[in-house]
Amino acid sequence: MQEKKLSKILLKIAVYAMLAVWALIVLFPFYWMLLTSIKSYGSYNAEFIPKFYTLSPTIENYISAFSAVPLAKYFLNTVIYTVVTTALMLVIAIPSAYAFARLEFKGKNLLFLSFLALMMIPTELVVITNFTTITNLEMRNTFTGLILPSAASVFYIYLLKENFEQVPNELYLAAKVDGTTDFKYLMKVLVPICRPTVVTVTILKVIECWNSYVWPRLITDNPAYYLVSNGIQEIRENGFGRENIPAMMAAVVVISLPLIVLFLIFRNKIMAGVARGGTKG
């Protein structure tokens, strides 16, 4: 018994040691980014061998991040793009998932399989099609052109549908007997029950919008509509230059901080929502 207990303790120690090492590997880039951002340009370039600490931290790089380019404007654009796109996605995805999960109509399974098949199309082909469509509609360099192609997501519809189907159908039948409309049942019963998955989908969409780079870079060449992801390239080309790494890292820290805080606050809901959305029964 003692040997068995000792082996379990040693196994647990080994597992935690491996997790600790893996955590250090994952977190080290963030630490290096933050450390570099508080080093002065001169001290950073004077390091022949990179140091893992600094004795003279400075916030000069953060001040430069907002003065070299209109980073605050890029932040505002990104907030508008993220909030509107996420709201539209929820308006589209939640009723669509509900229709596939609860309603019965002709061709439902075939239509859903067609939706899933869209996930197999390479992103590059979708980008080309969307670019041609938005250009023909003369929506380039507009928030409408930025938002519309990202407003719908087959993956989020699928995730919500799987979660909605886990709710017992007896609740739906009882609600219909009481005269409850489908919309009222969806908003008053189904969405509150599936709140972890809805929150997860919302947060994942916010992260997706915040990190979006290819589409905004392709559809906008007017700095008035740049997002923070495009702002990084603008900072590199027209702001600090390629050699001022500490200032670049300061800008990256500022841009990354909202997502890091968002994930830390809602990490438990994200994990719970993904787990529920991918489990049947």
Image (cartoon, rainbow, N blue to C red):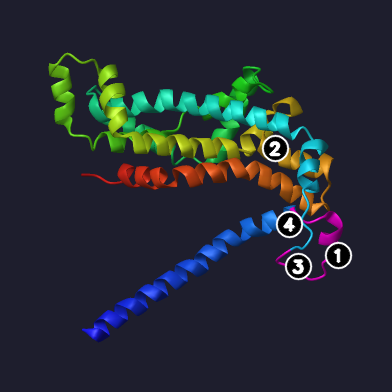
List the residue tagged with mark 3.
Answer: 50
Q: Give the range drawn in magenta.
A: 38-53
Name the quarter where the C terminus is drawn: top left
Q: How far apart are marks 4 and 3 (CA)?
A: 10 Å
Q: Earlier in the sequence, mark 3 or mark 2?
A: 3
The residue at which mark 1 appears reads as 46
Q: Is 131 colored magenta in this rendering?
A: no
Instruction: Determine the secondary structure under disc 2.
Output: helix
Q: Name the residue under label 2.
A: 230
Q: Is residue 226 visible?
A: no
Q: Judge whether 116 appears above or below 1 on screen.
A: above
Q: Which residue was labeled with disc 4? A: 36
Q: What amino acid is labelled 1 in the image?
A: Ala
Magenta stretch prevailing secondary structure = loop
Residue at image coords 31%, 30%: 192
Q: Where is residue 53 in the image (x, y as percent from the top left)?
A: 72, 65
Q: Is 127 displayed left or right of 95 in the figure? A: right
The residue positioned 32% from the left and 32% from the top of the image is 112
Label 1 secondary element: helix
Label 3, residues with CA under 10 Å away: few <14, some 14-19, many ≥20: few
Q: Do the residues labelled 4 and 2 touch (CB within 8 Å)?
A: no
Of label 4 and label 2, which has the lower sequence position?
Answer: 4
Q: Compute the Cα span from label 1 to label 2.
A: 30 Å
Secondary structure category for the residue under label 3: loop
In the rendered structure, which amino acid carries the disc numbered 4? Thr
